[in-house]
Image (cartoon, grey):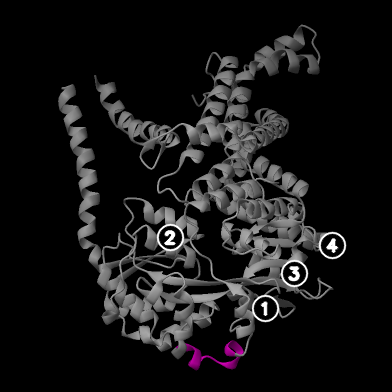
Amino acid sequence: MKKILCLVLAACVLFAFAACGSKSEESNRELNVLNWGEYIDPDLIEEFEEQTGIKVNYIEMTSNEEMLIKLRSSDSNYDLCFPSDYIIEQMIREDMLIPLDYSKIPNAENIDPKMKEITNAFDPGNKYSLPYMWGTVGILYNTTMVDEPVDSWGILWNEKYAGKIWMYDSVRDTIGITLKYLGYEMNTRSEAEVAEARDLLIAQAPLRKGFGTDNMRTSMVNGKAAIAVIYSGDAFACIDENPDLAYVVPKEGSNVWFDNVVIPKSAKNVDAAHMFINFLNDAENATRNTEYICYSTPNKAAMDRLSEDFTEDETYNPPQEILDRCEVFHDLGEFVEVYNAAWSKIKASN
Amino acid sequence: MKRKFFAYPYIVWMILFIAVPMLFIFYYAFNVDGEWTTEKFLQTMKDPDNWRILWISIEFAFGTTAICLLLGYPIAYILSNMKRSVAGFISVLFFVPMWMNFVLRTYAWSAIIEYAIPELFGVTGSLTDTASGRTIAVLLVLVYDFLPFMVMPLYNTLSKLDKSLIEASRDLGANGVTTFFRVVLPLSVPGIVSGITMVFVPSITAFTVPALIGNGAYMLYGNKIETAITSAAGYHRNDYSVGSTLSIILLLCIVISTLIMNHFDKDKEGGSIL
């Protein structure tokens, strides 16, 4: 009797697993997209679903590191994701990506060649990735709360603004700008330099309000904080809501970043993924998308369609002299462990 | 025979969702990229930062439990002396907020602390601007979240208390205070024990509250584990050693604290976790 019961139960468990397995057969009508929160115009997803009959599952992530962990897991089934520059370089090194088939992405020619030149730094010839959005890292500040001119990262250590300073909850950005402030390179592989940046950030602990991501936008718009380290796209959206805010890329230099679209090796539906990339790069769609997200588009055809409110704005469309003092993040290889260890120490300093 | 049959799904459940994940924790603590190593484990054990944060978390859990007990006992006592229908109604009111999701309630508190309270007093700054303010805010929300877990077991024990014992005590000349400390309090120990366990264990592992209320800059042990796991996106593909080691330490802390609490509640009257 006991044995029969065991067998029945074992069969049930097996059956449950088998049911999970057979689900993947139907999945060629589904597209699993892993992207940042609020990083696509939801109307576009609906239109794509209507046009193609493919169901899009939009899964959100909050950091590049989280995305990498999700993609590394053996049962990951994401067809498309939108990592940043240095992570793409790491994913190429770890052989996690499928090369793009440009015959299926005719709209790729809409991408500005100037942008492709910058992205060559981490993905030569855009073999695996196509720029989706880009921008800079800088300081968003409230002009009614900050008296002095803001042109340096140094203001993040100004005790006058204690409790009113938001930092970004991201290891590379936060340590990177501190390295820049100290006069070092953002991609440094010197343990002493990283340690110096770490100690400076630990000393900053009593001054900062917190490490934010999307929550600091609300806080800045409502005048709850004076200064925030932020991506240019978010800054642009905040200034639109509260004209007292201003954005600056400090004189010490900063980071110019790219979020590119890639197809991971785990993709089950490579054709649909290409269709979606092509759909996003359509001039009209790319225009609507950038208008919704407020992040800068690398799509030249879309730039031509945008109003002057976008193209003439230095936050949205930074002039060359700002870009000249910005660096692209690179994959650090094994040295990333040093950054991660420093980050743990910084986050633990409360 | 029949009873055993009903136990099987439970055993399968236990194996799949409790035993197997625990084995994984131990596996990953000593295994990096498929290679067995104790180097990372020892490194984590030696890091004074981890122990400092564990100690802060234990302090927080003690604080939350103590405040919950001090607030919860009088509430439960008053409830147990009310008419049953009234007490039932009030305890439902107590539980109504718990029908809402825990994370949503925490978000609501974040808005109250960040916007509503400063608005009320007409100031721009908020409690969470400073580290000490964040400590108070996190404690406040933890107490709010866990108070019902303290009140309910206490109320259960106190309302089952035989009233004739109290009458006997008064008959024999003890005043109200003596009766409370010599009769009511000792008899309610099982409720106190299970209340403490129900509050202490979740508050030592609290993760959402410090993350949301503390602006991502307040680190308790749960948040430490989270950072350890997310920064595992390093050079090694499968390096969860730090997070797993920290989890093992936390697991031991909980087992020890539960064993201590069970020691006080030999009759298992209030019901307990282990």
Mark 4 or mark 2: whose residue is earlier in sequence: 2
Q: Is residue B270 visible?
A: no
Give the CA separation, mark 1 to mark 4.
23 Å
Q: Dot 3: within a 10 Å radius of its alpha carbon, few (fewer than 14), some, or many (20 or more) residues? A: many
What is the chain identity of the residue bearing mark 3?
Answer: A
Q: Is residue A304 magenta?
A: yes
Mark 1 or mark 3: whose residue is earlier in sequence: 3
- Which residue is situated farthest in the top direction here? B172
Q: Secondary structure at mark 3?
A: loop
Type of residue at label 4?
A: Lys
Which residue in the protein does label 1 denote? A239
Q: Is residue B175 visible?
A: yes
Mark 3 or mark 4: whose residue is earlier in sequence: 4
Give, as a single range, the part of the protein colored magenta. Answer: A302-311
Q: Is residue A145 left or right of residue A71?
A: right
Give the CA separation, mark 1 to mark 3.
12 Å
Residues at discs 4 and 2 both on one chain: yes
- Along the line of sight, the residue nearer the viewer: A311 or A237: A311
What is the chain identity of the residue bearing mark 1?
Answer: A
1 or 3: mark nearer the eye: 1
Which residue in the protein does label 2 denote? A90
Which residue in the protein does label 4 denote? A160
Give the CA separation, mark 4 to mark 2.
40 Å
Which residue in the protein does label 3 denote? A223
What is the chain identity of the residue bearing mark 2?
Answer: A
**Residue contact between numbered discs 4 and 2, judged by CB atoms under 8 Å:** no
1 or 2: mark nearer the eye: 2
- What x and y, as percent, mark residue B145? 62, 43
Type of residue at label 1?
A: Ile
Give the CA separation, mark 2 to mark 3.
38 Å
Type of residue at label 3?
A: Gly
